[in-house]
Image: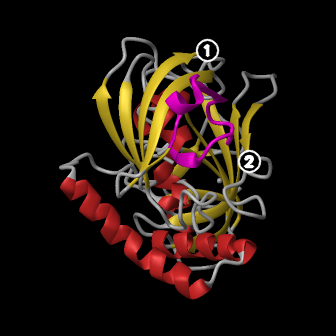
Amino acid sequence: MNLRSLVIAGIGMVFLSACMKSRHEGFEESETGLYCAMHKESGATKTPKEGDILWCKMQLFVKGAEGKKDSMLYDSNEMPDFPGGIKFIQVVKPEYAGDLMEGVAKLHIGDSASFIVSADSFFLVSNKMEKIPEGIKPGSELLFHFGIKDIKTKEETIKMISEAQSSKSGIDKAKLDELQASEASDLQAYLEKKKITAKPNPSGLVYVEVEKGNGKKAQKGQKVTLNYTGYLLNGKKFDSSFDHGQPFEFTLGKGEVIAGWDEGVSMMNVGGTATFVIPSVLGYGSNGAGGDIPPFAPLVFEVQLLKAQ
């Protein structure tokens, strides 16, 4: 996302003390309407600050009606952000009463808990989607299971991802450190030079809408067809669908492309054009790609979304 970016984790006793009995068996309802079920309290005292990253195990379900099974939407063991089945969740300011973020902000390392939230609020308010995904009925509820493994800053998380990637690539660490150190300043200089004022998503993606399409917004699981051209910050073109003589296709949200593409295309309407400025953590990281994309290289893509079906 930013999807906004999404954990079997826990809530502290202060949060639980504000809860009361609810219509969901085993769950208590907070004064704001967030349903919570405590499974384990680790006794740790550290809680995340706004902007921190939760390293966690996570499962997400559409909660079934009474007597019916819950339907799984996501399992971090199957689609992890990091080895070990880890999902990254960035803690941000809640946007509505009963927001999932009210609960995750109370979690400690080693805690485990579950939350139930409104599907409409989660998809339409938190994730800024125009409609909830196909197959999920309006008025449904989502069930999150969280298990918190660690809490780190965004910078610490990026560094650990880079180190994990570099250990596989065999690239000289001193050179990687040099490239990594210059990425942020190079990216900021590019945005200023191009007079790009769009604020980055929580993930770091900068999305610039050039022309909004008249079609529907692309949804996770759809096969999308698009034309694109990719550049480095210095303006060097490294790839284009036009050079291949045909548009490019992939299934949105399945990890078939770099994370910056999955997130950026999910923000587009069919027929629209946009520019993605993608930090390396959402691109090819410390490995780069072939001889065309160096390690820690931010990427710029001009994208036209042709179809989503």
Q: Residue at x 36, y 38 (%)?
A: 275
Residue closest to the eye, 89 or 101: 89
Residue 79, which numbered label? 2
Percent x, y for residue 32?
43, 44
- Can you name the residue that lies furthest to the bottom here? 174
Q: Is residue 173 left or right of residue 280?
A: right
- Queried whether the magenta region covers residue 191, the answer comes back as no
Mark 1 vs 2, N-terminal side? 2
Numbered disc 1: secondary structure? loop
Q: Which residues are magenta?
A: 239-260
Q: Is residue 63 left or right of residue 134?
A: right
User: Looking at the image, which is closer to me, 267 or 181?
Assistant: 181
In the picture, measured across the screen, residue 161 lies left or right of residue 97, that is: right
How many neighbours does mark 2 have within 10 angstroms: few (below 14), some (14-19), or many (20 or more)? some
**Residue underneath mark 1:** 309
Judge whether residue 6 can be spotted in this image. Answer: no
Magenta includes 258? yes
- Residue 180 percent coordinates (x, y): 47, 75
